[in-house]
Image (tube, coloured by chain):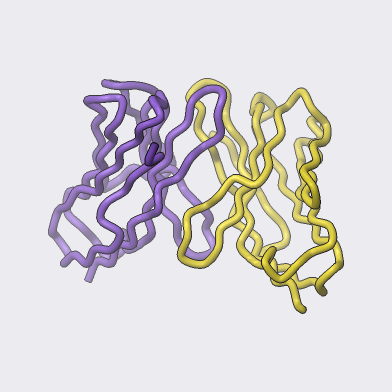
Chain colours: A yellow, B purple
């Protein structure tokens, strides 16, 4: 099955700075790459996603980039705010069964 | 439109007991999955279903059973609970065109 690696495991930034989280995947056939935000005690919530036919996608302060050749994708959060503090997960969807395989998560702390 | 509904939210079991975690969705999604979440390990796929009557194993299926008799429901059964099954369990559903929608989770403790 798909193997997704995520770095870093923890990230602290000052409010207003940018944060970047990186993921790699193993299956070149994977075609969909979502990012989830999970606050303490809550369910994962989809914040942005990208499909394999697109190189970059932006939604206000959040952007995701995809490099299919290198099999890696990244989450960029600009102008970070304290409410961005959470655990972020990347995932890759395998072709066929529609299953998502997740990275191990990044705990982002935004320091006011 | 309730999305994905999971019950119970919390459960404590003794080693060897069995139980069923319930999951229901009202979005007519064909895909449903169960994940467990452990500290530092992300979400790992237990079992999944691509439609009513069809189920298959994920990454960590041992000790769990599933069935999918209807499009809406996808229960997860723990056959004989072990302390290693202490975890947070999430049910999720999706269609080919949509992202995953997660339930609110079940926090299970096996003592």
Q: Residue furthest front?
A: B1
How many marks on residues? 0
The residue lying at 38 percent from left, 25 percent from top is B28
Question: In the displayed structure, would residue B47 be above or below residue A28?
Answer: below
The residue lying at 35 percent from left, 32 percent from top is B26
Q: Quadrant of residue A93?
A: top right
In this rendering, would A5 be left or right of B110?
right
**Residue B94 point in image, percent of width and height:** 47, 31
Q: In this orientation, which residue lies closer to the viewer: B97 or A65?
A: B97
Q: Residue furthest left?
A: B17
Question: In the displayed structure, would residue B42 be above or below residue B61?
Answer: below
Q: Which quadrant, please, contains the C terminus of chain A? A: bottom right
The residue lying at 66 percent from left, 27 percent from top is A31
**Residue A34 point in image, percent of width and height:** 64, 40
Question: In the displayed structure, would residue A71 be above or below residue A40?
Answer: above
In this rendering, would A1 be left or right of B26?
right
Q: Quadrant of residue A94?
A: top right
**Residue B6 point in image, percent of width and height:** 31, 48
**Residue B23 point in image, percent of width and height:** 30, 42
Q: Quadrant of residue B72?
A: top left
Q: Residue furthest bottom?
A: A112
The residue lying at 77 percent from left, 49 percent from top is A62
């Amino acid at each position: 099955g798909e193997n997704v690696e995520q770095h870093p495991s923890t990230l602290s930034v000052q409010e207003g700075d940018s944060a970047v989280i990186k993921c790699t995947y193993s299956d070149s056939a994977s075609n969909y790459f979502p990012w989830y935000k999970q606050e303490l005690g809550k369910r994962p919530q989809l914040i942005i996603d990208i499909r394999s036919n697109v190189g970059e996608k932006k939604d206000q302060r959040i952007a995701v980039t995809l490099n299919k050749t290198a099999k890696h994708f990244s989450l960029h959060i600009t102008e970070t705010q304290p409410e961005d503090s959470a655990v972020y997960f990347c995932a890759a969807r395998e072709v066929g069964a529609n299953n998502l395989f997740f990275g191990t998560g990044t705990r982002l702390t935004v320091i006011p | 439109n309730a999305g994905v509904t999971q019950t119970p939210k919390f459960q404590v079991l003794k080693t060897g007991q069995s139980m069923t975690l319930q999951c229901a969705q009202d979005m007519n999604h064909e895909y449903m999955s169960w994940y467990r979440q452990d500290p530092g390990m992300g979400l790992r796929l237990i079992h999944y279903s691509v439609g009513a009557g069809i189920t298959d194993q994920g990454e960590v299926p041992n000790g769990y059973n599933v069935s999918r008799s209807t499009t809406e429901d996808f229960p997860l059964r723990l056959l004989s609970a072990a302390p290693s099954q202490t975890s947070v369990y999430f049910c999720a559903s999706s269609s080919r065109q949509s992202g995953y929608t997660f339930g609110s989770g079940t926090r299970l403790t096996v003592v």
